[in-house]
Image (cartoon, rainbow, N blue to C red):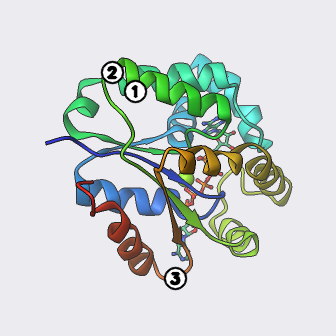
Amino acid sequence: MTTLKMVILGRQGSGKGTQSLRICEAYGCVHVSTGDMLRSAVEQGTELGRQASQTMEAGGLVSDETMNGIVAQRLSRRDIAERGVLLDGFPRTAEQANALERILYDLGERLTVAVNLEVPTKTVTERMLGRGRGDDTPEAIQRRLNLYEQQTTPLLQWFDSRSLLCTVDGVGTEDEVFARIRAVVSPAGR
Ligand code: AP5
Ligand code: MG
């Protein structure tokens, strides 16, 4: 059986991390969150963490070169060949999307589906201010949301042109949102 190779998209605070845990539990795939990987590098004080911490705190984007390298390395590991993957927070630029396609192609794989969680800016801002992560200051939130509109929104068209995009309403309870995601991921052999 082929495994799920999925991307979850959506603005900051749309619930990507929250829903990823449920999706991976239901479909058995590996959750690869580039934000979680970077936060763990910062916590452990690695070279990557030292380089990335200021960018993250200010709500900027770590370089494509760095991110593509991290993801290529992670996707080459055996657990992903065996269980499939859910990418959360990657790709977020056109260059990352092209790199992802190449990385999967080199591994003899291709994406199954890209789910876009649609939640209005006002709602995500309230959610993030309520969460209080290190980069959830009003300034960093604004910068992250601006970068999302500029760099990541164009990717919706990129995924759509490959017939991979499914947009899901991300407003509602976590259970309601998860049911909507399941309805688009489960059909068509996914
Ligand atoms: P990253 O960790 O990816 O953060 P983000 O994009 O800002 O997204 P969030 O994690 O804030 O949102 P989420 O959609 O996961 O929402 P969540 O489930 O937490 O990236 C952090 C930084 O790392 C970036 O800014 C950048 O610097 C760097 N980085 C990472 N990847 C990179 C890349 N590829 N390239 C370059 N740089 C990169 O939910 C939010 C809140 O809402 C929570 O409190 C949750 O409990 C609540 N919530 C969830 N669902 C619901 C619901 N249905 N109803 C009510 N509340 C809900
Ligand atoms: Mg997250």
Q: Amino acid at mark 2?
A: Leu
In which quadrant of the rendered image does the C terminus lie? bottom left
Crowd around label 1: few <14 · some 14–19 · many ≥20 (10 Å): some
Residue with the mark numbered 2: 107
Ligand 1 has an atom within 8 Å of the beta carbon of the residue at disc 3: yes
Crowd around label 2: few <14 · some 14–19 · many ≥20 (10 Å): few
Front residue of 118/132: it is: 118
Q: Position of residue 92 (x, y in %)?
A: 64, 41
Residue with the mark numbered 3: 172
Q: Position of residue 131 (x, y in %)?
A: 63, 66
Residue with the mark numbered 1: 104
Residue 13 position by quadrant:
bottom right
Which residue ends up furthest to the right in the rendered image? Answer: 139
- Ligand 1 - quadrant of the structure image: bottom right
Q: Amino acid at mark 3?
A: Gly
- How much space separates mark 2 and mark 1, taking CA atoms? 5 Å
Q: Nearer the viewer, mark 3 or mark 2?
A: 2
The residue drawn where x is 41% and y is 81% is 176
The residue drawn where x is 60% and y is 68% is 118
- The answer to whether residue 23 is seen in the rendering is yes
Q: Secondary structure at mark 3?
A: loop
Q: Secondary structure at mark 2?
A: loop
Q: Position of residue 38 (x, y in %)?
A: 57, 34
Label whose residue precedes the other's in the sequence (3 or 2)? 2
Label whose residue precedes the other's in the sequence (3 or 1)? 1
- The answer to whether residue 45 is seen in the rendering is no
* CB contact under 8 Å: marks 2 and 1: yes
The residue drawn where x is 44% and y is 22% is 103
